Amino acid sequence: MGLFKKSSKAYAILNLKCPTCHSEDLFETATFSFNKPFEMRERCPHCNQDFWPEPGYYYGSMFLSYIFTGFFCLGFVFFFHWGLGWSTEASFALLIAVCAVIFVYVFRVARSLWININFGYKPEKAKQA
């Protein structure tokens, strides 16, 4: 499965790993932890990659999150309302519940995607101790 091997972008983005070495996590806590869910590390402990290259760096990730969430919400409501015949109120109630559960993960994946767009994998950094 080449798409999700350690050296692929998809691996780093979906597993919230450092874009340079793919060894360490971008965030200090687990995804569904309510203890500091939005706190990101300053640097990678393995390769010393700076996760905050400049002030306002993650502003672009908000747009990615907005686009993903918008299309997800439209598809979700269309599926439950027209696909399964649920009422509009029930479809939106379920959507709100699902969005409340996945909000932190979407936030983190958007940041991971943004930093992975700007920084590439360096195998020599991944092998450093």
Image (spheres, rainbow, N blue to C red):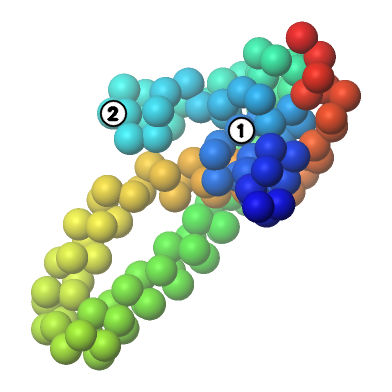
In front: 107, or 81?
A: 81
Pointer 1 with pointer 2, Cβ within 8 A: no
User: Would you say 98 lies left or right of 60 here?
Assistant: left
User: Residue 34 bears which disc, if any?
Assistant: 2
Say which quarter of the image contains residue 104: top left
Earlier in the chain: of badge 1 and badge 2, it is 1
Say which quarter of the image contains residue 17: top right
Q: Residue at x 46, y 45 (%)?
A: 107
Q: Residue at x 25, y 90 (%)?
A: 82
Query: Quarter holding the C terminus?
Result: top right
Return the residue at label 1. 17
User: Would you say 69 lies left or right of 24 here?
Assistant: left
* Residue 72 against residue 100 in the figure, above or below: below
Q: Position of residue 25 (x, y in %)?
A: 56, 26
Q: Residues within 10 Å of mark 1 (few under 14, many from 20)?
A: many
Q: Amino acid at mark 1?
A: Lys
Which one is closest to the eye, mark 1 or mark 2?
1
Q: Position of residue 23 (x, y in %)?
A: 66, 25
